[in-house]
Amino acid sequence: MPEKALFETAVENIIWSNILEDFHTCMPGRVESYDFKTQKATVKPLIKKVYNDGDILIVPVLPNVPVIFPRTTKSGITFPVNTGDKVLLLFTERALENWYLTGEDSTPGDKRKYSLSDSVCIPGLFSFNENNLASNNDDLEIHHNGFKITITKDGKISIKGKDDLDLLAIIDEWMSQMKTTKVITGIGLQPFDPTSITAMTVIQTKLQELLT
């Protein structure tokens, strides 16, 4: 390759390298604070920026970062976001402020691209050395503050509290007790009438079909 072409290639590489220095795509972050009313968080990016000359820049804490939850117009799932929780920070292709005003087609209003100013985050990106809540790879599990709802691949359900007590199992046990309980009547203690016992048995059978 001619010397001039080599020089032009080197200059082009330097130019592109400098341009890409200010482009951001995604990185892990840590929640510093969160406002559930606006669903915005203050997030600290967790990977430092290293320049070609070896200089290191600590990326500034980002305020007012929208937190993305699974949601449609009429449905959605929300859960607590706490200080210290990890998130995946995403930096959008164009400026967001005009779109935030309407949620419709809009012009960006600014020429910046992939900027720190246009970040959103998704909760749930944790490092490999942090606890995994999943018990297995077969069941649907919902965890919250020590409580767990499980739907197994076979369609069984459990609702367990902090002491591993299963709500459905407790209800089943209570219904078994009720079927043998006697009530006070004018002629003394008597069991429930057969119709009530039959109804309770039907309900209990349906309940047991859900128990793990």
Image (cartoon, helix red, strand yellow):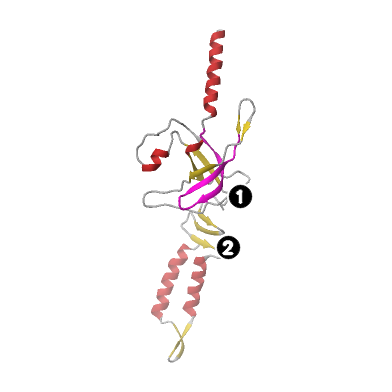
CA gap between label 1 and label 2 equals: 17 Å
Q: Secondary structure at mark 1?
A: loop
Q: Which mark is residue 162?
A: 2
Query: Magenta segment: does it hold 32?
Result: yes
What's the amino acid at mark 1? Asn
Within-10-Å neighbours for mark 2: few <14, some 14–19, many 20+: few
The secondary structure that most of the magenta stretch takes on is strand
Residue at 49%, 70% in the rendered image: 172
Determine the image quadrant of residue 44: top right
Q: Position of residue 150 (x, y in %)?
A: 50, 57
Q: Residue at 59% of width from left, 40% of height from top?
A: 46
User: Could you say where residue 66 lies in the image, as x and y percent from the top left?
Assistant: 47, 45
Q: Is residue 208 left or right of residue 59?
A: left
Q: Is residue 4 visible?
A: yes
Q: Which residues are magenta?
A: 24-48
Task: Indicate which disc, 1 or 2, sits on the residue closer to the N terminus.
Answer: 1
